[in-house]
Structures are given as structure tokens and as C-alpha cells.
Image (cartoon, rainbow, N blue to C red):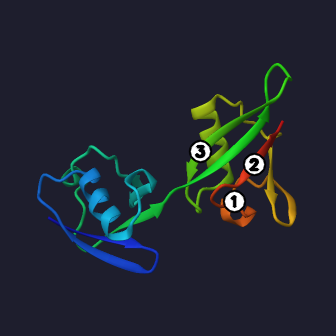
Amino acid sequence: MNVSVIYGHQIFYVALRDDSTVFNLKRLLGQELDLPVENQLLDYGDIILSNHTPLQAYQIDPNELILLRDLYEIFFEADSADGHGIRRFRLLVHQNNKLRELKNMLHLHHGFAIGDNMTLRVESSFGPIYANDDHRDIYEYQIFTGTVIRILQ
């Protein structure tokens, strides 16, 4: 089977065995791009491809592109529940995640209650940025690799 993957402004044409999984494709892309498998997110239409699923299960049209997004690590800090210190949390994200998606990830992975009053303070080189528009992409708030974000409730 043949698939086409777009990453940045480049298109990669990859020939794979018919029984190849998403993980097999990620491994090949990782070797070509020096991008670890765990930092790759493959998106076909509105579907996030799952590592252990055979590519054929997605019925990928050979004339369409699979989008490769590179994931990066960011950190969140929040006061501990007992008020004695700060807890730190890690998430893998991509630059086109919306602020609402970050809040949902905090809820799913770390149990935070999300609500309209949750504000995120991004520590940037220009000083703090208060992120509160859920519909904006995170890169608009200067959230990049290694960014530390403070959760304000």
C-alpha cells in the first residue's frame, strides 16, 4: 500500500506492506525525520490514527494526505489541594491545539474540574500572558516546548 504524508511544507510518499500498522508508518517517518514515534500524531480527515490499528482499516484514499503533527511537551503548575506546595503536570500537545482542548486534557489526564472561570497564566519572555479564550490556538499564547503554565481557578 502507498500513502502520502504531509509534514510542514513537505510531502512524503511511503510504500508499506498491506498489513502495516500506524506504528509501522510512524517508525519509518521517525527514521526519515528524526522525530520520535511518541512525538508524532497522524491525522486523516478528522480521525486521529491509533498506533496498533492496521492502516487499511482507515480506508485511506491514495490521493489524499495524512497530516503529521509533531507533539511537544508543556508543563502545568497548580496549588496542591492541601495548600502546601505546587503540583506539576505534563502534557504532550501540538501547536494547533485549542485552549479548550488543553483544558479537556487537564481534566481527562489529571482530574481538573474545568469551568468558565479557569484561566491559564503562561509565563513568557515578555511577562505573563493570561489565556482565557478557549477558541484560540495555543501558539497564539506563545505556548511552545517547555512552556510552564500556571492554572488559576
> Which is more N-terminal, label 2 or label 1?
1
* CA gap, disc 1 and disc 3: 12 Å
Above or below, comparing residue 36 to residue 7 in the picture: above
* CA gap, disc 1 and disc 2: 8 Å
Label ID, residue 1: none
Q: Name the quarter where the C terminus is drawn.
A: top right
Please name the residue shown 67% across and 46% down the image.
75
Please name the residue shown 69% across and 31% down the image.
112
What is the secondary structure assignment of the residue under circle 1? Answer: loop
Where is mark 3, residue-wise?
Answer: 91
What is the secondary structure assignment of the residue under circle 2? Answer: strand
Q: Which amino acid does label 1 sit on?
A: Ile
Q: What residue type is labelled 3?
A: Leu
The reply to whether discs 1 and 2 touch (Cβ–Cβ < 8 Å) is: yes
What is the secondary structure assignment of the residue under circle 3? Answer: strand
Above or below, comparing residue 105 to residue 135 in the picture: above
* CA gap, disc 2 and disc 3: 11 Å
Where is mark 1, residue-wise?
Answer: 143
Please name the residue shown 60% across and 41% down the image.
105
> Which is more N-terminal, label 3 or label 2?
3
The x and y percentages for residue 103 are: 67, 43
> Which is more N-terminal, label 3 or label 1?
3
Q: Nearer the viewer, residue 18 or 30?
A: 30
Where is mark 2, residue-wise?
Answer: 149
Above or below, comparing residue 63 to residue 51 in the picture: below
The x and y percentages for residue 104 are: 62, 40
Task: Give the class, few, some or many, for how many residues have Cα within 10 Å of label 3's Cα (few <14, many ≥20).
Answer: some
The x and y percentages for residue 17 are: 12, 59
| Residue 130 location, quadrant | bottom right
Q: Is residue 54 left or right of residue 9?
A: left
